Amino acid sequence: MNTPFTESRHLKLDKVFKKLQKIRLNSIRLSFTLLLFGFLFQNTNLQAQEERSLADRFDIHMDLKNMHLWHGSVVTSGAMLASSLEYSSLDQKFILGLWGGTSFSGDYKEFSYFAKYQFSSNFYAELISHNNYSNEEDPDIFSYDKYTSPNFLDIALGYTISEDLPLSIYWSAILFGQGGDYETESDGSVTNSYSNYVEVSYPIFKDTKGELKAFAGGAFSFTTDKTFYSDKANFVNLGLSLSHNLDIFSTKFPVSGTALWNPETKVGALQLAITLF
């Protein structure tokens, strides 16, 4: 039989139990609310990071040069601006870009596109559509006709052996468009050259202040004697390139000087360049 004392004790225990249940329920609610808030905050933060990452994947660059050299050729002998707009993947292995070059005189005009994939720190492949319409009165940027258009597409591979042996090898081959990359036979038939350009380079010295690099490039074709760069297989690009950073108002600007000699065309030139941004 329950006494008044026992009933009073049970009543007190019941009240304590109910308070504990209420405290536990409130704790669960608070924990759930904090967890939900934390999830929402983390999700919002990740979205903000993704938005920033997406914005950071786009980049623009501009170079100022006294002339423009490419694969042993003087593309334009006058001062020019080179600009690029690039998009890179989140892992920065894939780059898609537009490249434009314009001389101050307006004689040289180029608008090219490229795609590059970095397989590793020392190996990459790229596709480049070269669209130089400087001498075109009525240019067609979409035409790759090998007889009438200067536009052409090539594929290139770049490989550096190692940090201990920093010998770099670059190989490009013209795929189509050609822009005159063919040879006319005596019977009037035409054979595509699919010209190859191979260049090796090696740093003579390299430190935190800059780098001096020597390079040698040659052209050949598997199908014709004539190439896009030469009348026959030959060295077309021998030279040195010096690069370092120039300090202006506490800002570092990459600068370079490239000297080339072309044994095929008997031409020599010195290109000076500064990257503005």
Image: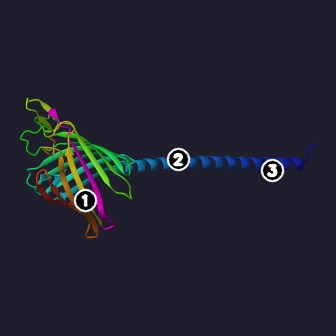
Q: Distance between the residues labelled 3 and 1?
A: 93 Å
Mark 2, secondary structure of its residue:
helix
Residue at x 73%, y 49% (from the top left corner): 20
Please say whether residue 145 is one of the residues in the magenta stretch. no
Q: Which amino acid does label 2 sit on?
A: Phe
Residue at x 80%, y 49% (from the top left corner): 13
Which quarter of the picture shows residue 174?
top left
Q: Disc 3 vs disc 1: which is toward the camera?
A: 1
Q: For the residue carrying disc 3, how many other residues have a C-alpha within 10 Å: few (<14), some (14-19), or many (20+)?
A: few
Q: Please state the horizontal and vertical placement of residue 3, each as a whole percent of the image.
A: 91, 47
Farthest residue to the right: give it: 1
The magenta segment is: 191-209
Mark 3, secondary structure of its residue:
helix
Mark 1, secondary structure of its residue:
strand
Q: For the residue carrying disc 1, how many other residues have a C-alpha within 10 Å: few (<14), some (14-19), or many (20+)?
A: some
Question: Which residue is tagged 2?
Answer: 39
Tell which of 39 and 252 is nearer to you.
Answer: 252
Mark 3 vs mark 1: which is more N-terminal?
3
Q: In this rendering, is residue 250 above or below 230?
A: below
Please say whether residue 195 is one of the residues in the magenta stretch. yes
Position of residue 124 in the picture relative to residue 227 (left or right): right
Q: Please state the horizontal and vertical placement of residue 143, each as a whole percent of the image.
A: 15, 35
- Let me know if residue 47 appears in the view: yes
Q: What residue type is labelled 1?
A: Ala
Mark 2 vs mark 3: which is more N-terminal?
3
Question: Which residue is tagged 1?
Answer: 214
Q: Please state the horizontal and vertical placement of residue 170, each as a whole percent of the image.
A: 28, 49
Quadrant housing the N terminus: top right
Residue 12's mark? 3
Q: Disc 2 vs disc 1: which is toward the camera?
A: 1
Q: Disc 2 vs disc 3: which is toward the camera?
A: 2
